[in-house]
């Protein structure tokens, strides 16, 4: 295979890479800020787009935006284009 494979991160790995807790990742997903993971058997795997989304959320929070404002600015649903 010549192309790079999509990263497959578990929720714990995603949280660590984003510098937040698993609880925060689950909270963002429940609020619709993060798209659901790709399921393989009973395990959810997250990719680069999930990690970038979490980094964006953290940056916006650092600028003083609350999660409600972030949801409005990002277009609500995680799957919707921003």
Image: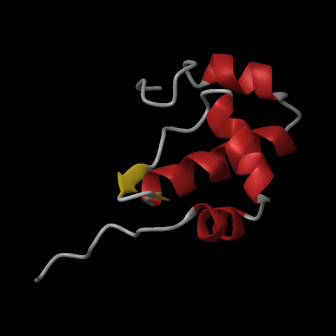
**Percent coordinates x, y for residue 64 in the rendering:** 89, 34
**Percent coordinates x, y for residue 66 in the rendering:** 84, 28
**Left or right relative to 17: residue 40:** left
User: Which of the two residues, 68 or 43, is positioned nearer the viewer here?
Assistant: 43
Residue 53 vertical placement versus 4 (above, below): above
Residue 17 vertical placement versus 70 (above, below): below
Identity of the residue furthest to the right in this view: 64
**Percent coordinates x, y for residue 68 in the rendering:** 77, 20
At a point 43% along the width and 59% down the height, the residue shown is 47
**Left or right relative to 41: residue 4:** left
At a point 61% along the width and 32% down the height, the residue shown is 33
At a point 71% along the width and 26% down the height, the residue shown is 70
At a point 60% along the width and 27% down the height, the residue shown is 32
User: Which of the two residues, 72 or 8, is positioned nearer the viewer here?
Assistant: 8
**Percent coordinates x, y for residue 12 in the rendering:** 66, 67
Identity of the residue furthest to the front in this view: 42
Quadrant containing the N terminus is: bottom left
Coloring applied to the structure? secondary structure
Q: Quadrant of residue 60?
A: top right
**Left or right relative to 74: residue 6:** left
Identity of the residue furthest to the left in this view: 1
Q: Quadrant of residue 63?
A: top right
How many dots with numbers?
Answer: 0
């Amino acid at each position: 295979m010549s192309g790079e494979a999509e990263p497959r991160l578990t929720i714990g790995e995603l949280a660590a890479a984003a510098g937040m807790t698993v609880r925060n990742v689950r909270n963002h997903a429940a609020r619709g800020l993060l798209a659901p993971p790709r399921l393989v058997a009973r395990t959810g795997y997250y990719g680069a787009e999930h990690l970038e989304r979490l980094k964006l959320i953290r940056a916006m929070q650092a600028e003083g935006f609350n999660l409600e404002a972030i949801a409005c600015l990002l277009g609500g649903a995680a799957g919707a284009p921003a």
